[in-house]
Amino acid sequence: AIEAALRLAVAEEQFELHFQPQVALPAGRLTGFEALIRWRHPLRGLLSPALFLPVAERLGLMRRIGGWVLREACHVAASWPGGLQVAVNISPCQFEDGALPATVATALEESGLPAHRLELEVTETVLLASGDSALVQLQALRDRGVGIAMDDFGTGHSSLTQLRVFPFDRLKIDRSFVKDLPAGDDAMAIMRAVTGLGRSLGIAVTAEGVETEAQLRALLAEGCDAAQGYLFGRPVPGCQVPAVIAAL
């Protein structure tokens, strides 16, 4: 039933984007939002991506869904003031046909969003699955001015190797490390190591899942560049973004 409903959802674009604030530290200045997909199911209401994206991947629907997210995120972000960025997650399947740079170029041109205001988030899985093809496409996007971030840094098997083969603009530290701050000695040591690595390589470091003032103080003490999480704001529909911009 969920598979049939999901196929219909893709055909009818029953999805919507919510946007979570991203801030620069130490001042907490708003720099942009991460676009997060939701499914407005006709019977079950608003569904989080964890409930349907694995099914979409199994059905081969992720490329169409990913293309919609990219177009919609660029369209919405184009109306935001100043230089606020939008971050969009890219799945491995979007690299398979080599057309991602062209897809991104079309989304930017149709929306009028400048390339430097778009940041694409990829995981190590992308590079491990697609290899040189992904690297070539990422470099083409970076040459155009699009930012490239490694998402969920620290959870894979070859993060450091990937940093040697591609000049990422940002590392996003996985929330699993942030949640144990400041009490967890191991978490603090990892945070210290990653922020130091970022400084040495000239790569910005963002901490995900920041929920408490204590976590924020620990991040500030280590010189973390940026953060996102419930402490700064939950994901909100696009219509509520102007209010978040005004508040932050």
Image: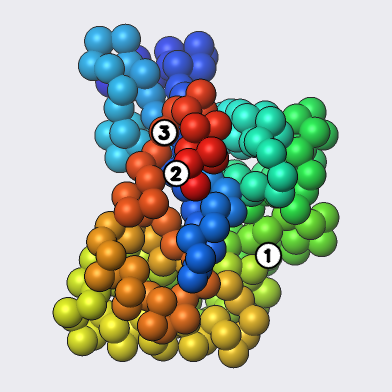
Depth check, front residue: 130 or 77? 77
Image quarter for residue 202? bottom right
Query: The residue tagged with tag 3: helix, strand or loop?
Result: strand
Callout 3 environment at 10 Å: few (<14), some (14 to 19), or many (20+)? Answer: some
Which residue is depicted at the point 82% across and 55% down? 144
Image quarter for residue 133? bottom right
Which residue is depicted at the point 55% across and 32% down? 242
Residue type, mark 2 in image = Gln
Query: The residue tagged with tag 1: helix, strand or loop?
Result: helix
Residue 158 as seen in the image, left or right of residue 30: left
**Does residue 60 appear in this view?**
no
First-in-chain label (2 vs 3)? 2
Badge number at residue 135: 1
Q: Measure how far apart labels 2 and 3 are at the Cα level.
A: 6 Å
Residue 96 as seen in the image, left or right of residue 107: left
Image quarter for residue 77? top right
Q: Which residue is mark 2?
A: 20
Q: Which residue is mark 3?
A: 236
Residue type, mark 3 in image = Val
